[in-house]
Amino acid sequence: MKTCFLCQQLGTQYPIIQAPMAGGILSADFIAKVCEFGLLGSIPSGYLTLAQLDTLIQSVKSKTDKSFQVNLFVDHCEYPDKVAKPAEVIEIEKHLGIFTSQDCQLPKHPSASDIIDLVIAHQVPIISTTFGVLRAKDYQRYKDAGGQVMVTVNSLDEAHKVLNAANADMIVYQNALAGGHKGGFNDAEYDAEAVMLTLKRDYPYTQLIKSGGIVNQRDILFALKQGFDGVQIGTGFLMTQESSASQTYKQALLGVCDDNQLMQTTSITGRQARGIVNELAMLELECSPLFPQQHYATKTIREHAKSHDLPQYQSLWAGNGAVNITSLPELEDYMFSLVYG
């Protein structure tokens, strides 16, 4: 697999990005190994305090001098310190014998501006955004510091809005097969890949990265043949021996042999996300949940389920590519297979 213009922008040897999966799945060692192999390692800032993110960035920098990125959840909203749990969540807590309170606490999240300050101080060369775009002043501050910005979209309309406003250097197109949260910033449906590729006509020099349903070299080569400049992979990295996903989670992923075992749900975090069908994903709520309030409302359940090996109450995010993975390789072997087959 040859280097390309995208590789020059990313500072990598290959046009492959390890998806920034939040929730403690990726260690500093893991991310650094990805970078050392010649791919773009990604640090997820979602759910981290500024101090935790600072420590993680420092740890990755201590293990590699290769390029990496930091991902931001961007929504520019203010949230209360405490919210009431939905009645349906309380019912599950009582069923599991872990109910203690009608409410849940929401930690103070750092602002996008605070994170920009931090990544500039650390001279992080690339950032990506999920759920939104940076404010113009933050984007410009980061650009003036020499950084490059990738924005996650699900539709052509989102991509046009970002590029027309000159708020991105690269676009990550996340399709309907991707695991985890739908990463765009409006309610638009997923556009087909052929539709997204028309973006290259209006913005021929903008690098377009495909995310979703990519787990092996065949998938990568197909994406490049379609006209995408590179790929982003999540589930494949999740299903390596070195990922911090629990063994229960990994075994559940290995058990996915049909797309019907996966679903889109908002009941776990309040945002649409794809994962394995289980009781928590299928939970029907009388009131529409919000993000991140619902994430913290179900946190006690998910932590209990993880520590007690209860897959029915965990957030088992997975893309459709899981269907094509039948083993849990070592990280080095997995990356070798992506590049050399």
Image (tube, rainbow, N blue to C red):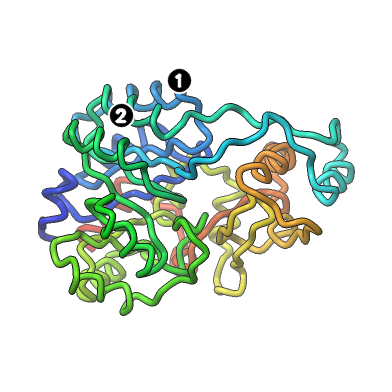
> Taking 150 as reference, is 198 above or below it?
below
Q: Secondary structure at mark 1?
A: helix
Could you tell me which residue is drawn at 52 percent across and 59 percent down?
Answer: 318
Q: Residue furthest bottom?
A: 194
316 sits left or right of 14 in the view = right
Q: Position of residue 26 (x, y in %)?
A: 43, 38
Q: Secondary structure at mark 2?
A: helix
Q: Residues within 10 Å of mark 2 (few under 14, many from 20)?
A: many
Q: In which quadrant of the rendered view does residue 307 lie?
A: top right
Q: Position of residue 52 (x, y in %)?
A: 46, 24
Residue 215 in sight from this viewpoint: no
Could you tell me which residue is drawn at 31 percent across and 69 percent down?
Answer: 219
Q: Which is nearer the eye, 196 or 313? A: 196
Residue 149 in sight from this viewpoint: yes
Q: Which quarter of the rendering shows the C terminus?
A: bottom left
- Gap between marks 2 and 1 measured at Cα: 12 Å
> Taking 108 as reference, is 226 above or below it?
below
Q: Position of residue 198 (x, y in %)?
A: 25, 76
Q: Amino acid at mark 2?
A: Val
Q: Residues within 10 Å of mark 1 (few under 14, many from 20)?
A: few
Q: Which mark is residue 51?
A: 1
Judging by the rendered image, the residue that carries numbered circle 2 is: 119
Could you tell me which residue is drawn at 53 percent across and 39 percent down?
Answer: 23
Could you tell me which residue is drawn at 25 percent across and 71 percent down?
Answer: 199
- Sequence-earlier tag: 2 or 1: 1
